[in-house]
Structure formats: structure tokens, C-alpha cells
Amino acid sequence: MKLIPFIKKRSIATLVFIVSLLIIFNALLIYHYKNIIVKNNAIILKSDEISENVNGLVVELLHNLEMGIRGYSVTKDVNLLSPAMEATMKVDKRFDKIKVALDSQQYDVTQLESLRKTYHDYIDFVLEMKKSVDLDSMQRVKAMMKEDRGLQVFLKWIDVGMKIINYEKVLKAEANIEYQSAVNNNLYLQAFILLIGLPTLGFVIYKMRNDERQRQSLLMKLEENNRRYIFDPGTAIEASNAEEIIGNSIVNLQQASEFIENIAEGKYTTEWAGLNDANESRNKTSLAGRLTNMREQLKQLKREEERRLWTNEGLTRFSEIVRNHQNNLTELSNEVIRFLTRYFGAQQGGLFVLREEDTGSYLELAACYAYDRKKFIERRVDIGIGLIGQAYLEGETTLLTKLPQGYTYITSGMGEATPGCLVIVPMKYNDKIEAIIELASLEKFEDYQIIFLEKAGEFVASALQSVRTTERMQQLLTISQRQTEEMRATEEELRQNLEELQATQEAMFRKQEELDRMLQD
């Protein structure tokens, strides 16, 4: 019986104790959820790293091996072979890095070792092809190139590498699910604390009515804490209006809960109502400010992820286009400029290929793309003339922005135009510029797009070098075949003359025999 009067007398203290326990429990769970988030972020980062390294087996190593030995087979240029030789040194390092990461995930690396063996077999094949090239065994080289061992390695990579990538996707998905569960549990906890806190605040307000001075003091502290830790609108504090202060606290908590829920759902455009430039400095350390900063960081991460996916997908598609058309300069030029113009959302594009003649070198417009329609225009740009020729001399990317409206003349490969942004990128491979690409757009090109364009230029320059080498070889082969045909025709003519001479001699012998018989008779 004495317990009930004690509880009534110490009701506020009891409630404060309960709330304190809830706060401590909340803090512990927040720390626990933080650890879950950190752990899952580490899993996601590791999965991304593994996927990137697995993709690198094809994008970097296999590509360098394939292009290096093919270029060397045609030209015997050691500079073209160096990427392939460097790739042979990186294979085991890349596989070891992937294996260590997969071992930490308890993934069965048996198939990975099988893929490693396939790469080593291909490296042996490449080295054997190099020996054949060095010995000028071109028939052997042609036969080895027709085997297309690189495709076999790629198919093996598809079988093994995609399983690893899919496995990493599953891990990421599980990590995201666990992350979402932690966020949801935290929301449930906040809702529970809210349900417990509201009656507590009501009882405290009821008790504070009996003591005006304590009521004023507690309301003032409540409002100050609400502004310090949740949201400070920057307005004057009205401690006399208890309902308004409590209502603001509830609204802020609800807004915080909705804000967190929206962020968890990926709605990064959500705003904290009432937060503006006037009170932004007041909320740098409040929940509203911290949640807003977290939203901006997540938006940045999402933006970077979208750019990374855009770059990887574009380079993959672009390398496939270059690989499929690398034996025909005209088709390669048209496909390259068409893809880049559309992929960048540009309005105009032009590809200028280096032409080297006895009288000098110049740039020729090999392909252009304008307003979703292809136009074939013969255009020659001398080295050092205009933006195109100057970009070739400097070997650096040129970016023009903020062009005034009605600016109708630009010394560029496309002549007169009024784009909002113009980028000119030298396409070079092994420090040699093979072509210049020019894109014009109404929108400004971002830095990551220019970096993408420079990387794509390496593919095109390498392919152009290969095309030029192939064309020179074909020209030499055509001359050789023509000379062979001429020799065969001469030989046939001599053979016919010899047969006619033999027939004449035989006729003369027969006539001589007849004459001898007539003389004897």
C-alpha cells in the first residue's frame, strides 16, 4: 500500500527514469544499427571491387593481350606489343586479388583457378604467336589468328566471371535488405518512443500547471532542446504556449521520421519543411541539418554511381562497336561518330582522321553526324589551322562553353554553328594522335563525359592504327598478286610461242623427209 503513494509522489522522476532507459536503449540500438550499416557498406564496397576486378580481366587484360599481339603480328611494332606484355605480368596479380577477396567471402574459387589456367594458356599462345612473328612465319601466324583464342577466353570468362558477378550482386542485395531492416527497426523504435513520450509529456504538462514557474522553465528547456537537436526555425520562443511547443516537437519528430523513411526509399529530393537560407546556419548540428547533409551525401553517391554505370556501359558498348568494325575505316568512322553523338545527347559531331602523304599530313573529315541525320561532307583541315588543327598540334582536349546566342562562326571542322558547348578531343594511342573528334551540344559537357571521350579515343586510335596497317598490307598483297598474274600471262604467251615453234619444226622435218624420199626415187 505504501508503494502507490511513493509512485504518485515520484511520478515525474519515475517517468523520467523510464524515458532515460528508453533513450539509452535507443542509443544502444542506434549504435547497433550503425554497425550493421557500416558492415553492409563494407560488403557492398568489396562486392563492387570484386566485380570491377572481374570485369577488368576482359576490359583491360584480355583486350590488351588481343589487341597487342594482333597489332604486333601485322606491324612488328614493339610499342603495340607492350600492352600485351604488361598484361601478362598483371594476370596473376589480378587473379590473386580476386581470390583473396572471394576467400574472405567463403566463395569456392575452383572455377576461378580454372579461368586463371585459361588465361595462362592464352598467354602461352600469345607468346608462341610472338615467336612465329619474330621468325616471319606468317602462315603460322595467320593460322593462329584464325583460331581466335581470345574469343574462347572470353567465353570462359562469361561462364566463370558472370557467376562471380551475380554472386556479388546477391551479396549486395542481401546487404541492402539488412540495411533496410535496420532502418525500419529504427523507425519502429522511434515510433515506440514517440508513443511512450507523448503520454509522458502530457502528464508532465499536467503537473507543471500546478507550478507556473516550473512549467515555464520546463517548457523553455523543451523548446531549446527541440531547436538545438531537431530543428530551429529561427523565430522567437513563446514559452507561454505549451500546446504550440509540444505540437512543434511532435511535428519535428514526425517530419524527421518521414524524412528518414523517404531517404531510405531513395527519395533524395525530399525537403525539410521550414529549413531555408535564413535559418540554415542555426541547424548545422541539429537533426534537420544532419539529415539534410546526409541526403546531399547520398545524392552525391547516387550521382557518382549513375555516372560510373554510364561510363562502364558506354565503354563496353563502344569497344564492341570498334571491335566489330575495326577492319573497315569508313564503317568504323560512321559507327563511332553516330554512337558518341547519340550517347552524349549532342546535336552535332565530326570525326577527323589523320592522312599522311608525301606532300604532308592533314586531317580529313571521315564521318559526321548532325541533328539525327548523317551527312557525308568532304572536308580537309590542315595541321595547325582552326580549332581542329590546333588541337592536333597541342594534343590536348579543347572545351568551349558559354557561347553567346547568335554566335554563328566558329573556326572548327563544322564551320558556322551556335552550340552552347563544343568539345574537341585528340584520339591518341601510344602518344600518337590518329584522329580528332568534335562534339557540339546545347548542354555543357561534364568532366566525367570528357574523361569518357578521352578513354574512348584510345580504342578508336588503336583501331585506326590497325586499319591503316591492314590497308597497307592489302595494298602490298594486291601489287604482289598483280605482278604474279602478269608473270603468268607472259609465261603462257611464251609457252604458246614455243608450241608454235615446235609445230613449225615438225612440219619442216616432215617436208625434209618427203624431199629426201623424192631424191632417192
Image (tube, helix red, strand yellow):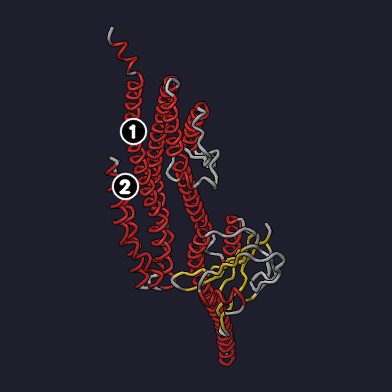
Residue placed furthest toward the top: 1
Secondary structure, mark 2, is helix
- Residue 173, by quadrant, is top left
Q: In the image shown, does 427 or 420 lie closer to the viewer? A: 420
Amino acid identity at mark 1: Ala
Q: Is residue 219 left or right of residue 437?
A: left
The quarter of the rendered structure image containing the N terminus is top left
The residue under label 1 is 27
Q: In the image shown, does 429 or 65 lie closer to the viewer? A: 429
Task: Answer few, some or many: residues within 10 Å of disc 1's Cα (few below 14, many 20 plus, some between 14 and 19).
Answer: few
Amino acid identity at mark 2: Leu
Q: Is residue 16 above or below residue 391?
A: above
Q: Residue at x 46, y 41 (%)?
A: 291
Q: Is residue 156 visible to us here?
A: no
Marks 1 and 2 in Cβ contact (< 8 Å)? no
Q: Is residue 113 left or right of residue 258?
A: left
Task: Answer few, some or many: residues within 10 Å of disc 2's Cα (few below 14, many 20 plus, some between 14 and 19).
Answer: many
Q: Is residue 117 above or below residue 418?
A: above
Q: In the image shown, does 273 or 142 lie closer to the viewer? A: 273
The residue under label 2 is 112
Residue 453 percent across, percent down from the top left: 52, 62
- Residue 107, by quadrant, is top left
Residue 372 percent across, percent down from the top left: 67, 57
